[in-house]
Image (cartoon, helix red, strand yellow):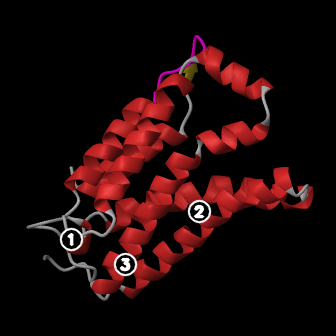
Amino acid sequence: MRPLQSVAMGMVIILLVAPVGGFDVLADPVGWLLVLLGLRALPPEVELRGTLLVLGGLALLVSVPLWVPDVVEALDDADESIAWALNLPQLGCFALLALALLRAAEAAGDRTARTWWGVVVVGLGAVVVLPVLIFGAGLDDLEGLAGALVALVPLTMVVLLFVCSGRDWAGAGAGGRTHEGRPG
């Protein structure tokens, strides 16, 4: 499996919820293990690789207690800003990965991928900042935008991870495809 395919599959497991007996059978820690395997397999030239591994590891650690139904139930009763804060390692990892892939695509001359990764970086930045404006500044009118971005940006990122997984600059390696679709 190519590095970005592993990251994408991990994100799918993290984003989907399949509750059985109170537990999510698509356990987020398993998703984070796949993400970390993919990040570790990225070429060393990919910027921020070390930081991505640290943030991914932190997100994995945070996801373990959040898999326990009693913890999730307690968080549902707590302030919404706590849940936002607990998601920061995950959002930070995804945002830095998008930035690293934007830079890799730019260095490879892949303008289309660079543009799309730029959209994801901006979208993830908004996903991080909007809750501060909603919870902290009381700008409740932004809730609809925040909800739409929380749904669309990760989905866009998963699709881009799969689309870009075969590109040499994304760690496809020998036998991969270039951004023009020709064998590498």
Residue found at the very far left of the displayed protein: 174
Residue found at the very far top of the displayed protein: 21
Please determine whether, in this image, residue 67 is positioned above or below residue 79.
above
* Mark closer to the chain start, 2 or 1: 1
Give SS at disc 3: helix
Locate residue 153, reporting x and y percent.
Answer: 59, 60
Residue 103 is tagged as 3
| Foreground of the two, 141 or 87 | 87
The residue carrying mark 1 is 45
What's the magenta bit mostly, secondary-structure-wise? Answer: loop
* Residue drawn at the location 23% of the way across and 51% of the way down: 40
Magenta residue span: 20-27
Q: Are circles 2 and 3 on residues that touch, CB within 8 Å?
A: no
Q: Mark 3, residues whose alpha carbon is within 10 Å: few (<14), some, or many (≥20)? A: many
24 part of magenta stretch: yes
| Foreground of the two, 112 or 125 | 125
Give SS at disc 2: helix
Residue type marked 2 = Leu
How far apart in space, not on screen, are marks 3 and 1 (Cα)? 11 Å
Is residue 160 rendered to the left or right of residue 6? right
* Residue drawn at the location 42% of the way across and 49% of the way down: 55
How far apart in space, not on screen, are marks 2 and 3 (Cα)? 16 Å
* Mark closer to the chain start, 3 or 1: 1
| Foreground of the two, 8 or 127 | 127
Is residue 37 rendered to the left or right of residue 86? left
107 part of magenta stretch: no
The residue carrying mark 2 is 124
